Amino acid sequence: MITLLTVIRKKPEVSTEEFRHFMKYEYGPTYQALPQTRAYTQYHLTDLASDGAEDPIDAIVQISFESQESMAEALSTDAYKKAHQLRERYMRETSLGIHSARVDDTVTFV
């Protein structure tokens, strides 16, 4: 299983309500519909640590695939390409707005 965590920052001109609606009703269902997706969770956030040095984080998405190959297959579909185009209206591009990282290990204490 391969799991990615993606930190997302919305564009400044997009309201929080508009962004969350897009994430919940347009963007997320696209990934849910991909047969390669094993798990998909959105965390909509209010960033409490914003000191002005960086823009606040608006969401974190956790998505899992069975393998690297199934992830590559999902990312080459027309549905994913459509989701990628849709997000251009709402999310900042580059690592400032969309920053993904692979989970290598999970340590749970509680």
Image: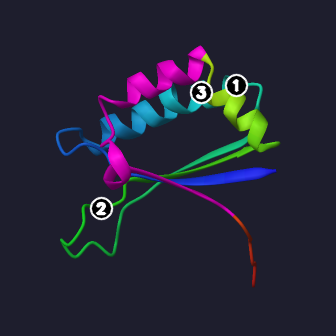
**Distance in Å between CA atoms under marks 3 and 2:** 24 Å
Q: Which residue is mark 2?
A: 56
Q: Is residue 5 magenta?
A: no
What residue lies at 40% left-to-right and 23% top-to-bottom? 85
Q: Which residue is mark 3?
A: 29
Q: Whole-percent x and y of residue 83?
A: 49, 25
**Distance in Å between CA atoms under marks 1 and 2:** 29 Å
**Distance in Å between CA atoms under marks 1 and 3:** 9 Å
Q: Which residue is mark 1?
A: 34
* Secondary structure type for disc 3: helix
103 left or right, relative to 93: right
Whichever of labels 1 and 2 marks the residue nearer the N terminus, that label is 1
* Secondary structure type for disc 2: loop
110 left or right, relative to 95: right
Q: Amino acid at mark 2?
A: Pro
Q: Are marks 1 and 3 in contact (CB under 8 Å)?
A: no
In the picture, residue 29 is in which quadrant?
A: top right
* Secondary structure type for disc 1: loop
Mark 3: give few (<14), some (14-19) or many (20+) Cα within 10 Å.
few
Q: Are marks 3 and 2 in contact (CB under 8 Å)?
A: no
Q: Amino acid at mark 3?
A: Pro
Whichever of labels 1 and 3 marks the residue nearer the N terminus, that label is 3
Give 8 or 41, whichever is nearer the viewer.
8
Q: From what the image shows, is residue 108 above or below residue 89? A: below
Q: From what the image shows, is residue 18 above or below residue 10? A: above
In the image, which residues are magenta? 78-103
In this orientation, does residue 38 appear? no
